[in-house]
Image (tube, rainbow, N blue to C red):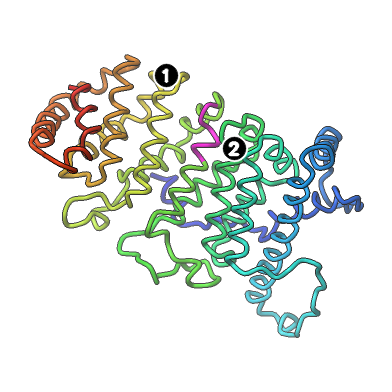
């Protein structure tokens, strides 16, 4: 589609390299009592009071620790961004040795930054600190950092997306911020930028500049699965969020690509298994199930995902086309819930005979098993028996 081709030919960074650091750095300084520059955006009185309440009257150690983590992270990330900018500037002036900028923050290693982000993730599991972090500009910080291919190490970018998922899950206040900020579109763009193309493998970096290793595509699917998880957490249970995602061509294509629908023939393995890694197929199928079996799902929404549902029926239930047991079980559970809800199940009619045929064969195979194999397949057997 036009959208897919456009995303594949563009990067996920945007033109304002490092702009995602600005609001968070200013907000952290603001809570320490320093005066903001006239060029920075003003924090609302409501947000300022809320931040003061959480940071000073809440669990002080947690609030102070969050501020320390963010100060240390922004210091090191700022250095990475400036180093990358200096490396791409070919003017004569840039060749002069820059004056060393004094900073009170430690110079963190890649592992240090990942550890701090994991600690931050634990802190923002608490809803008040999630709101406080968001008020500081946390959403654009995380999304912006995750988009810095070639500048920020992939493990750090991946950790930022994991924090975003925790930040937004079951938190309508933060979900509102994500929706209004356009972060879902940025995540969708990043998903496609990270998707390997054709014969692209590890070692074939994109042409977007920066460190070669950092620009390698997400071959193992771990980063893209985290992107899908973050998008899922950002909209699940949020009426407007679910509606907006499902109405978006880019959102639907993330689901289609994650399942394997948009794979080219070169991307399909010789054994017929889908090219997308199991971790990505699992995460994407879970998200699809949540969207089409949601309490707010309409017949029109389900029709939008008809290609995905048909693909699940034809390619994700049989051991001959889907090797991952968890994917098969999730697919069966999704179909069972659709039937129970009786919401536009007529669209399953076209696949009924094929599904029943696969089911009868699989039930027979499992019943003939013994020992650990039969125990391992017991839940799949239960799902098949309930479905057919």
What are the residue bounds of the magenta stretch? 231-237
- The furthest residue to the top: 342
| Figure check: 86 above or below 275 | below
- The furthest residue to the front: 371
- Which label was assigned to residue 298? 1
Q: Is residue 247 left or right of residue 306?
A: right
**Element at badge 2?**
helix
- The residue sitting at 79% across, 78% down in the picture is 100
Query: Looking at the image, which is closer to me, 342 or 261?
Result: 342
Q: Position of residue 283 (x, y in %)?
A: 40, 42
Q: Position of residue 119 (x, y in %)?
A: 63, 52
Query: Looking at the image, which is closer to me, 300 or 77?
Result: 77
Discs 1, 2 touching: Cβ within 8 Å? no
- The residue sitting at 50% across, 67% down in the picture is 214
- Which label was assigned to residue 279? none
Q: CA distance from mark 1 to mark 2?
A: 24 Å
Viewport quadrant of the C terminus? top left
Q: Main secondary structure of the magenta part?
A: helix
Q: Say which quarter of the image contains residue 173.
A: top right
| Figure check: 262 above or below 232 | below
Residue 161 highlighted magenta (yes or no): no
Q: Is residue 63 left or right of residue 81?
A: right
Residue receiving disc 2: 168
Q: Position of residue 134 (x, y in %)?
A: 70, 41
């Amino acid at each position: 589609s036009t959208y897919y081709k456009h995303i594949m030919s563009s990067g996920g960074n945007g033109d304002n390299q490092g702009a995602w650091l600005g609001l968070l750095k200013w907000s952290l300084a603001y809570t320490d009592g320093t005066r903001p520059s006239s060029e920075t955006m003003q924090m609302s009185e409501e947000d300022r009071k809320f931040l003061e309440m959480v940071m000073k009257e809440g669990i002080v150690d947690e609030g102070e620790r969050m501020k320390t983590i963010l100060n240390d992270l922004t210091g090191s990330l700022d250095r990475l961004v400036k180093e990358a900018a200096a490396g791409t500037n070919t003017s004569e002036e840039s060749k002069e040795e820059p004056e060393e900028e004094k900073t009170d923050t430690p110079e963190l290693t890649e592992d240090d930054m990942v550890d701090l982000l994991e600690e931050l993730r634990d802190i923002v599991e608490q809803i008040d600190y999630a709101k406080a972090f968001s008020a500081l500009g946390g959403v654009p910080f995380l999304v912006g950092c995750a988009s810095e291919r070639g500048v920020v190490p992939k493990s750090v970018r991946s950790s930022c997306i994991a924090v975003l998922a925790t930040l937004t899950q079951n938190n309508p206040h933060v979900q509102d911020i994500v929706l209004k900020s356009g972060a879902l579109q940025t995540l969708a763009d990043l998903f496609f930028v990270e998707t390997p193309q054709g014969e692209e493998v590890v070692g074939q970096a994109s042409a977007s500049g920066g460190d070669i290793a950092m620009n390698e595509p997400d071959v193992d699917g771990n980063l893209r699965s985290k992107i899908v998880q973050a998008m899922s957490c950002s909209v699940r249970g949020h009426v407007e969020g679910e509606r907006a995602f499902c109405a978006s061509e880019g959102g639907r294509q993330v689901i289609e690509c994650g399942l394997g629908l948009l794979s080219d023939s070169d991307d399909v393995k010789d054994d017929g298994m889908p090219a997308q890694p199991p971790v990505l197929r699992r995460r994407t199928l879970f998200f699809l199930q949540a969207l089409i079996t949601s309490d707010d799902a309409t017949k029109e929404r389900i029709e939008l995902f008809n290609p995905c549902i048909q693909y699940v029926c034809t390619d994700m239930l049989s051991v001959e086309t889907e090797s991952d047991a968890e994917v098969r079980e999730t697919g069966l559970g999704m179909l069972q819930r659709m039937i129970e809800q009786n919401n536009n199940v007529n669209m399953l009619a076209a696949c009924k005979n094929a599904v029943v045929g696969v089911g009868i064969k699989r039930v027979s195979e499992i019943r003939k098993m013994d020992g650990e194999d039969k125990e391992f397949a017991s839940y799949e057997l239960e799902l098949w028996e309930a479905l057919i």
